[in-house]
Amino acid sequence: MVVKNNFKLIFSYLKLNLKKEYEYKTSFFLKIVMMILNNAFFILQWIIVFSIVDSIGGYGFNEVLLLWAISAGSYGVAHLFFNSAFSVGELIYNGKLDVYLTQPKNLLINVCCSSCSVSAIGDIIYAFVVLIIINATWWWYLAMIPVIIIGALVFVSIVLIFQSICFYVKNGSAIADMISSAITMFDNYPPVIFKGFAKVLLYTIIPAGFMVFIPAEAIFLGFNPWAIAILIAVTALLVVLAFVTFKLGLKRYSSGSLMGSRL
């Protein structure tokens, strides 16, 4: 029942947020189109690279675009459904959690889903456009849906864990922003180029490996049930850690004594 209510809350927020954004129709569609075009420009980068080399550690043009598709789709789902997760630190620092504390809903979900990024729809669409470009087989389109949902959960969870630092350190959200930027920067490149300590980081503090690399190699470019099981387990662990970290930090929260309400 609790899980059902939380899902209902998430989709209710999404519906309300999109309805609010859709009041300005031109802006709504322009944001989506511009995001698709912005992502598409990076294809030119790889066209140039692969006009010089045939592959990078076994990754060709199609494989690299697959990484882009998973990355963009995961980023899109994260910002469409849980956009406010990326500003939790600011709410903590400014004492603006008060309004959410008065509502009889799961606090963290309530906060994370309170806003959405319309341009994120463009990221999700782009993920499937890329599949068309690389002439993907039909089941890749179906597999992409759970893959980008898992990627989004990994992304949001690790960001929330670092956003919760703000309960202990003033303006600690800078660290979370840095981690978020690092994930979106590194997960678009073939994993074979990362070695040693950098590779360790991409499977721990900057979990691009679980967000993009493992899904690509264990689902689309091959089939490894053990890797898939590990991916699901790590995702569940990160989600739990995000909730626990936030809950523990909440004990140190100082109210901003703000008067306000939310509909």
Image (tube, grey):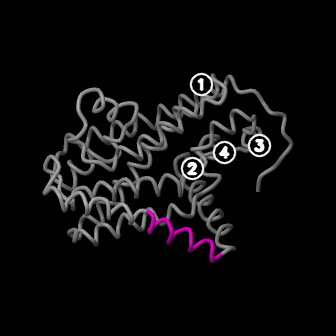
Residue drawn at x 38%, y 40% is: 235
Disc 3 crowd, CA 10 A, few/some/many (<14, 14-19, 20+): some
- Circles 1 and 4: CB distance less than 8 Å? no
Q: How many marks?
A: 4
Q: How far across and down, in percent of the image, does residue 260 sit?
A: 83, 46
- Circles 1 and 3: CB distance less than 8 Å? no
- Give left or right: position of 3 versus 254: left
- Circles 2 and 1: CB distance less than 8 Å? no
- Seen as rendered, the residue at the extreme bottom is 26
Residue indicated by mark 1: 248
* Lower sequence index among marks 4 and 2: 2
SS at mark 2? helix
Residue drawn at x 62%, y 43% is: 87
Residue indicated by mark 4: 105
The amino acid beneath tag 2 is Asn
* Lower sequence index among marks 4 and 3: 3
Residue indicated by mark 3: 99
Q: Nearer the observer, disc 2 or disc 1?
A: 1
In the image, residue 173 above or below residue 24: above
Q: Overall secondary structure of the magenta stretch?
A: helix
The question of residue 76 being in magenta is answered with no
The amino acid beneath tag 1 is Leu
SS at mark 3? helix
The range drawn in magenta is: 25-38
Q: Nearer the observer, disc 1 or disc 4?
A: 1
* Lower sequence index among marks 1 and 3: 3
SS at mark 1? helix
